[in-house]
Image (spheres, rainbow, N blue to C red):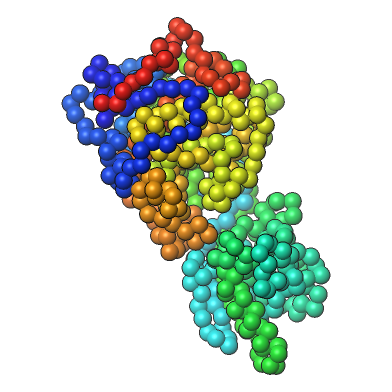
Amino acid sequence: MIRRLAVAMATYLLLFAIGPSAGVALGSPSSAASALLGSTSASTITSAECDAQVNDTPSKLLPCIQQDDLWKHMQAFEAIAVANPSPADGHPSRNSGEPGYKASADYVAQKMTDAGYNVTIQQYTFTYFAYKAPPTMSEVSPVAHDYGLTTEWNSGQSVGTANAELQPAGGIIIPPTPTPTSSSGCTAGDFSGFVAGRIALIQRGACNFGVKVLNAQAAHASGVIIFNEGNPDRTAVLNGSLVDAAGNPIIPTIPVAFTSFAIGSDLLNQYQAAVQNSTPLPVMSIKIEAIVQPNAPDYNVIAESKGGDKNHVVVVDAHLDAIYGEGMLDNASGSATILDIAEKMKNVTPRNKLRFIWFGGEELGLLGSIYYVNNLSSNDRSHIGYDLDADVTATPNYVVGVLDPAGPDLFGRNVTQTFPNRVYKASTIARDQAIAYFDSINLNHELFSPVGTDAFSFNQVGIPASGLLTGQDCCKSAAEVALFGGTTGNFEGNLGTTDGGCVDNPFLWCDNLSNNDPAVLTFMSKAFATMVVQMAFDTKVMSASNNAVFNKKLPIASEATRRFEAK
């Protein structure tokens, strides 16, 4: 456990510019997390004592990041969700555009105001979409079958009801080739001869899903079923985003269903058999009820330290919004992490100005962070030297992920984005600070791309970034189990089905407080705190330096050359 400095400088190792490395693999998530934290004792510093002192070094700050304080914020976020059910489905909610999100923003703003930060709330608008009831899809004839939501199909973000015969679009390639080649539905020509009013069956491939749907709408289809292409890693039940050729989100007024290659192939075979035998075509039914509100308000909460160089800003962020419910793991956990760190650093006068931001709309496409960076003046943008992102920090079946711009993305495990050296090299500074901490507590780690997190919005405009994540509650490989313990999960996107995952699933509503491990939340918050306090005093935060350099007169400088042994 981490004890008071006067007793022992425990559980912390401060190193700089080290390469990625791995510690000793731990056992199951719960036992591993508990072992890292140890048991409490009378010598542990109290939260009240922490509030009274200046926590300007890792050795002061880390013992003050305590489970009880973190968990109180988590309980507050859940209470907000329960008190503010969604106007669409009536479930507890903290979704963007709903009362629970605004109440969450107000809670954070008040806490940060009370801690002495300068707080502003930045408002923007977006198109709000929420399901009123679980969507349904069925085959009416010739074989009656109700398809299981999430297990056999997923609903595209669309609205409407269709009861009609099925007709495939052109361009379907079956059997599939070893690599993706289908362009089904990507051109108007794929709907030549399409009978108005029928439901279009379309294969994944070549163009955005929204392009396929817009072409189907232009051909007067009453609904769309898009099935996975069938190549390796493209077989399972699909769950796609509907965007047009320019990448702009669309909400079609006909229902859109996504399904697996096997189900799509079966429907295609039924259609072809009916045509060949001159028997009735398959009849499908799709129903999707939702509320759509253009120009709905959403909010970023921004809280700045009163001290620090305004020309050298470190942004510390987490997304505050949920999706489909309480969102306690994703991402009340990260929000609680940075809120507790900010409160424990309220008495600190940092070398660099600290700007804590809770973003909205992350789950809907990084809306809050994109709006924020796009609305910075070029001068203000140039003064942001670093971003630190906390995106999910309490997964029971956890991985220990450290953001690295050259790392693979969380789900596809492919390197999909690269950044210039001025972004990448500086991003490794905080990355290595986190790795040093995990090494010091004998905990393995792996590197992940910022793609899909708010850190990506900063990297895209040339700002170095790193951060932490513990992964979602569904998708974990055997190799990760060997590193971190726990159980494996599915990698083909079946969130919330055979894996039991709650995150991002619109119809389970189980990402509640019990979907978080408080011990994992605590050691991840301590790790994140090491990054925040060090970057707060890094005098080369604006450069692409391999090494953090501190003013020799600062208390943190003496810790940069000392090794603290875990007791």
Coordinates of residue 414 in the picture (x, y in percent): 59, 48
Q: Is residue 535 left or right of residue 566?
A: right
Q: Is residue 208 above or below residue 73?
A: below
Of 291 and 73, which appears nearest the observer?
A: 73
Tell me the residue at 60%/27% (across/down): 425
Count of numbered tags: 0
The reply to whether residue 439 is visible in this rendering is yes
Q: Is residue 330 left or right of residue 55?
A: right
Q: Is residue 276 above or below residue 413?
A: below
Q: Quadrant of residue 69?
A: top left
Q: Which corner quadrant holds the C terminus? A: top left
Q: Is residue 40 left or right of residue 361?
A: left
Q: Which corner quadrant holds the N terminus? A: top left
Tell which residue pokes out farthest to the left in this image.
42
Of 205 and 174, which appears nearest the observer?
A: 174
Tell which residue pokes out farthest to the bottom in this image.
278
Tell me the residue at 27%/38% (across/down): 35
Tell me the residue at 62%/34% (across/down): 459
Tell which residue pokes out farthest to the top in this image.
553
Of 337 and 435, which appears nearest the observer?
A: 435
Coordinates of residue 215 in the picture (x, y in percent): 75, 66
Coordinates of residue 437 in the picture (x, y in percent): 40, 29
The reply to whether residue 503 is visible in this rendering is no
Coordinates of residue 317 in the picture (x, y in percent): 51, 33
Q: Is residue 96 above or below residue 51?
A: below
Tell me the residue at 54%/66% (across/down): 237
